[in-house]
Amino acid sequence: MYAQLVKTDGKGVKPLDEMTPEERVFQQRIDDDQKIEPKDWMPDGYRKNLIRQISQHAHSELVGQLPESNWITRAPTLERKAILLAKVQDEAGHGLYLYCAAETLGISRDQMFDQLHSGKSKYSSIFNYPTLTWADMGAVGWLVDGAAIMNQVPLQRTSYGPYARAMVRICKEESFHQRQGFHIMMKMANGTAAQKRMAQDALNRFWYPSLMMFGPSDKDSVHSAQSMAWKIKINTNDELRQKFVDQTVPQAEYLGLTVPDKDLRWNDETGSYVFTEPDWDEFYAVLAGNGPCNKERLQARVDAWNDGDWFREGLLANAAKRRAKQGEAA
Amino acid sequence: MSESDLSKAELPLWEIFVRGQHGLNHRHVGSLHAADAEMAINNARDVYTRRNEGVSIWAVESSRIAASSPSDKEPLFDPANSKVYRHPSFFDIPDEAGSM
Ligand SMILES: [Fe+2]
Ligand SMILES: [Fe+2]
């Protein structure tokens, strides 16, 4: 999940009879699966919550480029390099689709960047882990994009029109990301002993951080209950995590790799795997800024923004000059 | 880490329309920021047509778009409800009359 911890302002879901007439009509529209569009009336909490969620999601796409761009110049073949470049470019696109969706709610692009740069707005904890070997490019595509897909597919049905449409575009592109990652893993796992060791090592390091992507258990959370009533969250974090484990364990077996969980076992009764939860203390530490790469990631974004300042200014000056020359009628 | 200066002008927002195939209308696909029309078209190419999604792009500055508001919905669209005779299915024509 790219928006792992989104708090609502409310104290849970309001019962229908405590709602104002406007709120009741709004909730009815959502219950009827009607999309809410930018100019429609919406409760303040819905707007605020969506801005938080979509901008966290957008920031994750943007920062998510960094661990992979680390390997573009060192990809093992020209083809892998071109593929990785295209994948990272897609993630930039995903960030842009989502920023646009958030902007329809009344926050500006620069305000969102400012919130990211100042640390006020979060991004997914997963991107604060380093990518140490080429096998990590496989593990990231397979596991991280795999977990993202798990989360994003249901969000195509989210109640806010611009968000849902952005998710449709994103989901169309994600499957390429996961498959290219799995393909790298296949090559490595079937390669030399050293390559197979790298693949296993990448799985070992990315397994639990990937499980953390879905966020802590939220089955009793008032925030999640409200988000689910508004259909800006469709499944609980635990549901999605379970689905991810059930899908991924057989894939690891296919690769001949071992999921780093001694207690992992199949439960015939539930028809799903029993697995070990990730270390949630580590999760909160990473989210608070103390993961292995937090400082480096944020600094890279801030530098990119600041270093582009003179260029943006030049573009605007040039556009103004051209407008003046042509007259406003152009 | 320096906070960005929010008093600085932001690149304007543009709405992007793409013609998916020859013979189809341009369709709204999303928006983006650009300093001018040329940059808007170039950015739209990168953001919205990475997989051959289009054969033509329109870019319109968002501030130039006039839009109806949700509260206008009734005066604008309700009058059409009572004019069902605008649809061909309103008229019962016997099969013997041939295709029509
Ligand atoms: Fe993405
Ligand atoms: Fe992706």
Image (spheres, coloured by chain):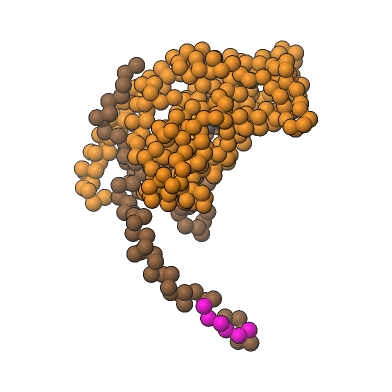
- What main secondary structure does the magenta stretch of the protein show? loop
Q: Is residue B2 above or below residue A179?
A: above
In the rendered image, what is the letter of the chain coloured orange? A
Q: Residue at x 62, y 32 (%)?
A: A239
Residue A152: tell me if it is visible.
yes
Q: How many marks?
A: 0
Residue A168 in view here? no
Q: Position of residue B26 (x, y in %)?
A: 45, 54
- Quadrant hosting residue B94: bottom right
Q: Residue at point 36% right, 55% down?
A: B70
Residue farthest front in this picture = A17
Magenta-drawn segment: B90-95
- What percent of the width, then of the height, locates residue A259? 71, 19
**Left or right position of A201 against A73:** right
Q: Is residue A131 left or right of residue B84?
A: right
Image colour for chain B is brown
Q: Nearer the viewer, residue A77 or B6?
A: B6
Location of the N terminus of chain A (image quadrant)? top right
Q: Position of residue B62 (x, y in %)?
A: 33, 46
Q: Is residue A71 magenta?
A: no
Q: Position of A220 compared to A96: left or right?
A: right
Q: Which is nearer the eye, A203 or B42?
A: A203
Q: Is residue A60 above or below residue B75?
A: above
Residue at the image position 26 percent from the left and 50 percent from the top: A330
Q: On the image, which quarter does residue A206 sit in?
A: top right
